[in-house]
Amino acid sequence: MNIFDYLKHWMIGITNAVIRFPIFIWSWLTAKPVPLETAQKRLLTCYDCDEFDLLLGQCQKCWCFMRRKVQWHNSKCPLDKWLD
Ligand code: SF4
């Protein structure tokens, strides 16, 4: 992957994050949290996933920031990899 691929990848990720920001805020305000163990299991699954961007902490399938998303009760993995 060259520097232009990295820049393109980051621009897509950041653009999607900006577009999804209102949804993120709404979820933050309204969603119920899951138990800490559940959030940790989800995040470990993401760390092992090929779609996870470790640098941004972002899923490349749904473009969500997973360190937050795993904490919400109504969150879903787009590839259905979470076991809860
Ligand atoms: S949400 Fe699912 S697809 Fe996305 S990084 Fe996590 S395990 Fe992978």
Image (cartoon, rainbow, N blue to C red):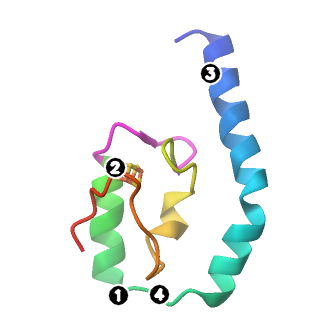
Q: Is residue 11 left or right of residue 58?
A: right
Task: Identify the element where label 3 is drawn.
Answer: helix
Asked if labels 1 and 4 touch by Cβ distance under 8 angstroms, the answer is yes
Q: Give whichever of discs 3 and 2 has the lower sequence position.
A: 3
Q: Indicate the position of residue 70 as horizontal and vertical percent values.
A: 43, 69
User: Counting residues from the N terminus, which is met first, the one under dot 2 or under dot 4?
Assistant: 4
What number is the disc on residue 35?
1
Image point (54%, 69%), residue name: 68
Where disc 4 sits, the SS reads loop
Q: Image quadrant for the C terminus?
A: bottom left
Query: Which labelled disc corresponds to residue 47?
Result: 2
Q: Give above or below for 64 relative to 75.
A: above
Residue 6 bears which disc, if any?
A: 3
Q: Secondary structure at mark 2?
A: helix
**Inter-mark Cα distance, 3 to 2:** 20 Å
The range drawn in magenta is: 48-58
Mark 2 Cα within 10 Å, few/some/many (few <14, many 20+)?
some
Residue designated by label 4: 33
> Which amino acid type is marked by label 3?
Tyr
